[in-house]
Image (tube, coloured by chain):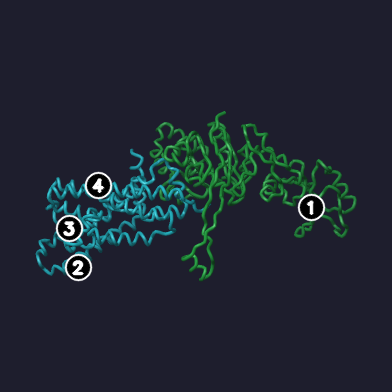
Chain colours: A cyan, B green
Amino acid sequence: MNRYLQFAVIRFKSKTAYRFDYFLGILNSLLSFVVYYSIYKALYGGAQSIDGISFSMVTTSFLISLGLSSAFNKNEMFLQDKIKQGTIANELLKPVNFKLRMLFEDAGEGAFNVVFNFLPTALIAALFANICAPSGAINMLLCIASVILGYIVLWQISFIVQCWSFWLFSVWGLVTIKNVVINILAGSYIPMWFMPEKIRSILRFTPFESIYFMPVQLYLGGLSQWEILLGFLRQLAWIAGLYVIGELCWRSGIKRLVIQGG
Amino acid sequence: METMINVENLCKTFKIQRRSTGFTGAVKNIFRPTYEYKKAVNDVSFSINEGEMVGFIGPNGAGKSTTVKMLSGILHPDSGSISVAGYIPHKQRKDYVANIGVVFGQKSQISWDLSPLDSYEVIKHIYRIPDKLYKDNLERYTELLDMSDFIDRPVRQLSLGQRMRADIAAALLHSPKIVFFDEPTIGIDVVGKDKIRRFIKTLNETDNITMIFTTHDMQDIEQTCQRLIIIDDGKKLYDGSLENVKSGCVSTRIIEAEIEDMTNGIDIDHTQITHDESSGKLIVTFDTDKISTSEVMSQLMSTNSVKDISIKEPGIDAVIRDIYEGKIKVRAATRVSADASVGAVAFSNVCHRQTAPQADTRF
């Protein structure tokens, strides 16, 4: 088995060790779904659609965003904790690329979250809410591809922020700010459809739109081929750009690493 | 013999924030932090041959661990060069670390939630260890380190000694050519220490693995290493054979005597006499090259009524302590060959020490 996949598997396995955590996780996801569902139900006030966007599209969008945020797992305190406790020493002793290893471990937990948290939540949600079906097999495949690219974009942003741990003792504040900004700008809290056109046209040039909203649109269908191609190119460009920045941060950070605690 | 590790003029400086205390201090820390620079490793050079087993000692904060971390590619040196098995550790980290094993006594490498066996499986994949080698090594280490009782229990349920043994096996599963032990016996009981030492020694002898062993326990060194490197304050103080250090204490003896009437002043030539307040004993330290034991004893007994007497020889701990404290001057010892006779310690003023003796010969 691939050595990096091994990190994903081990993460997946150790997550299964905490059962209570798992049940609470489902409850938590269900609650946030119900909250959004109720808010938008009230906003729609019985109307079938607003601006051509139906209530079930909004509901589906939420559910997908929920699924994505559980799949888009990242342990944002990973680097900080490793540096703080000095256990980064052990990580650097493994004959693997540190970044890839980190990515796979996060992805392993993401896979766990999707299987044991999102899927049960989605099934329960589908019982009482009207959820749209995927718009076709090809679109579904494109959606999954876009999800993977979106994850890499999101993960790299997180990595860059985490690299600040080499200079700062705590990056919790930075991470929190980053997450709020992303959640708003990426359309995870408010679907992009309802953003003012001016803001949307700016957001198109940021990496954020492609994270949550592109998979939603691909799932629901309705994007032209040109729009799909452009979306993917944009994602790839951001991945390349963020990779270079991340690599620079990591290299200058690791040079000034201090191992804490003996 | 081939040179395995070569270190030249290695330096590493850490920037430390000097924190002021109190409220105004806290405010000052935020707006105008002050820094100081600490030279953790200061111009250290040495070379180690293949299959050698070297004890690396020094007081806390001497720079041992920093050196080991630079040797293992974790920390980047500020200046100087390191070459280990043909690699430059910090530059070729990923490829290099596949050839080494590192055990940190203070940091476990195996996963908290899993059993050692599960962790070993992961290591097997990460290091791409062939099935046969993995099986052989696992079997061998399980037996040598006596791990069969706990190998399938979650690590968080293991005792420190068990976890340490599991950690050592983890670091050696891929049959590395070089192993660094950074205080592997810290906090371990006597039996556990013994198991670890014997394992390390066996491995060094049978597999010809090059090893560096940092510790504060001199018995670790005495039972495993032939060569000793002492560093303090980032500088190398001694590099040579362990025998040389030990021979420094061969001619020193300490007599402890309980004397009935202490009012008489006692003075014997060539000895140093102190009075230990807590035990009420007289402590006489001398060098047998200058005065014989029987001479000291007869002088002592002729002038006093001695109730109880014992002769001790100071252990290696005492010698090391004196080296740390600067009581013993170390002759500059730059090691050139594997021949251990180069480094030497000057023990001229050993007699002036007043340390607690170790080996005890009682009458």
Kindly identify the amino acid type of the residue bearing the numbered disc 3: Thr
The first of marks 4 and 3 along the sequence is 3
Q: Secondary structure at mark 2?
A: helix
Q: Looking at the image, can residue A67 be seen?
A: no
The alpha-carbon separation of the residues under discs 1 and 2 comes to: 86 Å
Residue extending furthest right? B302
Q: Chain of mark 2?
A: A
The first of marks 4 and 2 along the sequence is 2
Of badges 4 and 2, nearer the viewer stands 4
The alpha-carbon separation of the residues under discs 1 and 3 comes to: 87 Å
Residue found at x 49% / y 51%? A259
Q: Is residue A258 left or right of residue A232?
A: right
Q: Secondary structure at mark 1?
A: strand
**Label 2 neighbour load within 10 Å: few <14, some 14-19, many 20+:** few
Of badges 4 and 1, nearer the viewer stands 4
Residue found at x 65% / y 42%? B238
Q: Is residue B206 above or below residue A189?
A: above
Residue B283, disc: 1
Q: Chain of mark 1?
A: B
Q: Is residue A117 left or right of residue B343?
A: left
Kindly identify the amino acid type of the residue bearing the numbered disc 4: Leu
Q: Chain of mark 4?
A: A
Kindly identify the amino acid type of the residue bearing the numbered disc 1: Ile
The alpha-carbon separation of the residues under discs 2 and 3 comes to: 14 Å
Instruction: Determine which residue is flagged by label 4.
Output: A236
Residue B351, how many percent across, how many down?
A: 77, 47
Instruction: Determine which residue is flagged by label 3.
Output: A60
Residue A39, disc: 2
Towards the viewer: B158 or B101? B101
